Amino acid sequence: MMLKTLEKSGKTEEAAIAAALEELGLDRDDVSVEIVERAKSGFLGIGAQPAKVKVSYEVPDEEPKPALSSASRSKPRKEAAPAAQSADAPRVIAPAAPKQEPRVIAPAAPKQEPRVIAPAAPQQLRPERKPRQDRAPRPERRNDRPKQDRPARELKPAAPVEPKEYTPAEPGSMEEKIETFVKGLLEHMGSDAVPHAMKTGDDSYLVDLVGADLGILIGRRGETLDAIQHLTNYAVNRGQNKRARINVDAENYRTKREESLQRLAVKVAGKVVRYRRNITLEPMNAYERHVIHAALQDHPDVTTFSTGTEPNRRIVVAYSRGKAVSTDDE
């Protein structure tokens, strides 16, 4: 008989012995048990060790295998020689396995959260409309009254323009000199207008142009008329010791322009007082600036002054309660 041992561990000694007997398939009386290590519980499970036992048991001896004879040892083993391949036989090459393409794994679709559908709001019932009561038909209008014929509106005839009477200039006078120069200037301009000069003051004269198509001679905002006036003053006063002031007019343009400038001055002064902010007017000549200054010189809340150089000299209407009006041009 041969003696063998088996070591086994368990939570307790009995558990280790039971595990060893179960593995060997023996009873408690068929083995002898030696406790190698006892179980330790430790403190609160710290330092615990399992139990370890050694189980001894007897098994029958194994029978010896028969020894091989010397003849069988020396006899070599015949191996089957591989069949020699014929030199003439064609060599068969197996086809290469098809190359497998790498398998592409698509990424998993993101998990969709369940869609929560809010319950539909309860439908509000509209109140029933009351049946429309039939209205009584309107009485027809009676057109028994005879239509009264309105009297035709009488148009007032325009006031007739009385032709101005001009006194012929005396030979050798200043009026004759002015008319001679202006007439020659108009002929060079291709105009058939006739100038009439008259004395209005000690050293001031007025030249009134009479004829057709005078709008060309007036020009935009009187610019052509101002040019004629400037040339006339320069030519007539050349070489004279005493300077004469000559104004040129056509179709009473100067008077109409003066009235328009006076209305403009009052309107601009009202805006300056309302917004308390200065307003600069468009460029004007000396005569037109003088009209603006004169129109606002008695205004208690604004003052006027000129700025810039000719021909772009302008008037500034400023808010200045209680200050005197400045007329720095004339």
Image: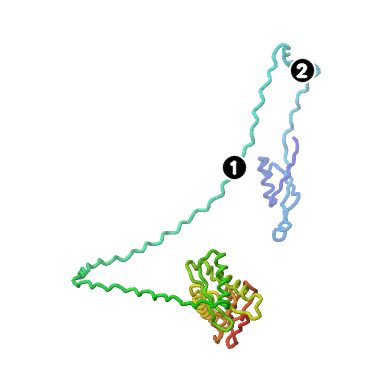
Residue 30 picture location, percent across and down: 69, 41
Distance from Cα at disc 1 to Cα at disc 2:
59 Å
Position above or below: 76 against 232? above
- 1 or 2: mark nearer the eye: 1
The front one of 161 and 168 is: 168
Image quarter in which the C terminus is found = bottom right
Residue 298 picture location, percent across and down: 55, 86
Mark 1 nearby-residue class (10 Å; few <14, some 14–19, many ≥20): few
What residue lies at 59% left-to-right and 42% top-to-bottom? 106
Q: Name the residue tied to disc 2.
A: 77
Say whether residue 238 is visible: yes
Identify the image's colour scheme: rainbow, by chain, secondary structure or one colour.
rainbow
What residue lies at 66% left-to-right and 23% top-to-bottom? 95
What kind of residue is marked 2?
Arg
Left or right of residue 79, residue 326 in this image:
left
Residue 49 picture location, percent across and down: 73, 54
The front one of 100 and 169 is: 169
Position above or below: 117 against 89? below
Q: Residue furthest front?
A: 171
Residue 207 image-quadrant placement? bottom right
Residue at disc 2, secondary structure:
loop
Q: State the mark number for residue 18.
A: none
What kind of residue is marked 1?
Ala
Q: Are marks 1 and 2 in contact (CB under 8 Å)?
A: no
Q: Name the residue tied to disc 1.
A: 106
Q: Which numbered disc, 1 or 2, marks the residue that appears first in the sequence?
A: 2
Residue 182 image-quadrant placement? bottom right
Residue 315 picture location, percent across and down: 59, 77
The front one of 283 and 6 is: 283
Position above or below: 147 against 324? above
Mark 2 nearby-residue class (10 Å; few <14, some 14–19, many ≥20): few
Total number of numbered discs in the rendering: 2
